[in-house]
Amino acid sequence: MRRGDTFESILAARGVGAAEATAWLGAAAPAFDLHEIRPRQGLTLRFDRETRALQAVRYEIDEHALLVVEQTDAGITAHRTELPYVIEAKGVARRVERGLRDDAAEAGVPPRIVSDLADAVAWDVDVESGLRPGDEFRVLYENIWQVGLPRPEPGKLVGATVMSRGEPVTAVYFEDAEGRGAYYLPGGRSLSRTFLRYPLEFTEITSEFALLRFHPILRRQRPHLGVDFKAPVGTPVRAAADGVVVFSERLRELGRCIRVQHADGLVSTYGHLSRFAAGMAEGLRVERGQVIGYVGATGLATGPHLHYALFRDGEYVDPLAMIPAEQEPVPANEKERFERIADEVVKHLDGLAASSSPHTVAVSAAPDPLGAVISGE
């Protein structure tokens, strides 16, 4: 949780509308008032992978109690249970053979952690097509065993190193005192930029930006002024950067389409959507990473995928070639704490032995894994 977050705003950023949020708030109220959530407390949302419907909410009330709110056959129910739960730091090191997505999945790294890794280093490493056999990745992430669940759920990607052609890029996760987290190089430079490189979970790029491309349906050469991402129907689509929705309707060949106006005159377009996220309308302000719609095949499409395009002043921009501005480095007043955490993360990453599956690096019952598992605080 970050300072200023509300339960409603967190759900809205993940595509859940106000009416549904109100239902979950009301159901939770007898056990705990979710209007009282606090910065740096853990909140876990579980969605059905097929329908994207919210299934469960778990919130760390304090060091001793956990709120559990779940969708059941009888409706939404809520109760408190005891903390602590167990947090493992899992690590895996592996050489690239086929590609990051395939090799990480084969090694047992959860898909969401792979997506977080791609987001963390995407502007410094071409994780889609820039890795070659013999390159390497090292990943350190949380595995959370919560009360009442039969299996663990992945938490944060704590740190990672991707070695591409002999050049390493290391990402370290760091949260400030108000719960705002981001990825940084060990020296404190931000790896995050004002735009996401991928507007959905890391997946296959099937068609890149091209001034001339053979169209598979129209059977003729024409420009392809965007990037196509293959993904299953219903995959969440994220706003690439902060901005304001300026269009959310059907648009000829693009089918259901959303356009977002950003700073510096940039406009992003998201086409072929199956549906829009709740509340999407002209004038709505969205944040980078907020769910705005879901992958589909509406309009002129051979199958489910996202068409993502950027333009400025009437001229299209290649989204993968654009170099967005870096976000701020680690603040000076947090530098000492960051360096202590970064040293520990790098030490654990460097110490990972090559393996075919993740293994446990450390275990903690504390609710702050970065403090207890990584830095020893």
Image: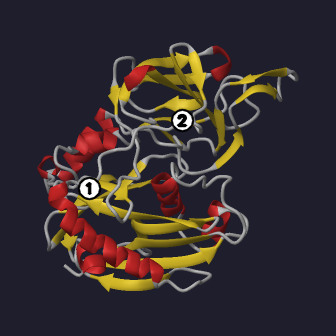
Q: Is residue 325 left or right of residue 209?
A: left
Residue nearer the viewer, 86 or 214? 214
Q: Is residue 369 left or right of residue 114?
A: left
In the image, residue 363 above or below residue 114? below
In the image, residue 194 above or below residue 102? above
Secondary structure at badge 2 equals loop
Can residue 293 be seen from the camera position used here?
yes
Report which residue position mark 2 lands on: 322
Query: How far separated are the C-alphas under marks 2 and 1?
Result: 24 Å
The mark nearer the N terminus, 2 or 1, is 2
Secondary structure at badge 1 equals loop
In the image, residue 341 above or below residue 39? below
Count every numbered label the image shows and give the total.
2
Report which residue position mark 1 lands on: 330
- Residue drawn at (64%, 52%) of the image: 128
Q: Is residue 281 left or right of residue 364?
A: right
Q: x%, y% of residue 144?
A: 36, 73
How many C-alpha atoms fall within 10 Å of the one at disc 1: few (<14), some, or many (≥20)? many
Q: Place residue 369 in its image quadrant.
A: bottom left
Q: Amino acid at mark 1?
A: Val
Q: Place residue 363 in its image quadrant.
A: bottom left
Q: Quadrant of the N terminus?
A: bottom left
In the image, residue 355 above or below residue 286? below
Q: x%, y% of residue 233?
A: 62, 41
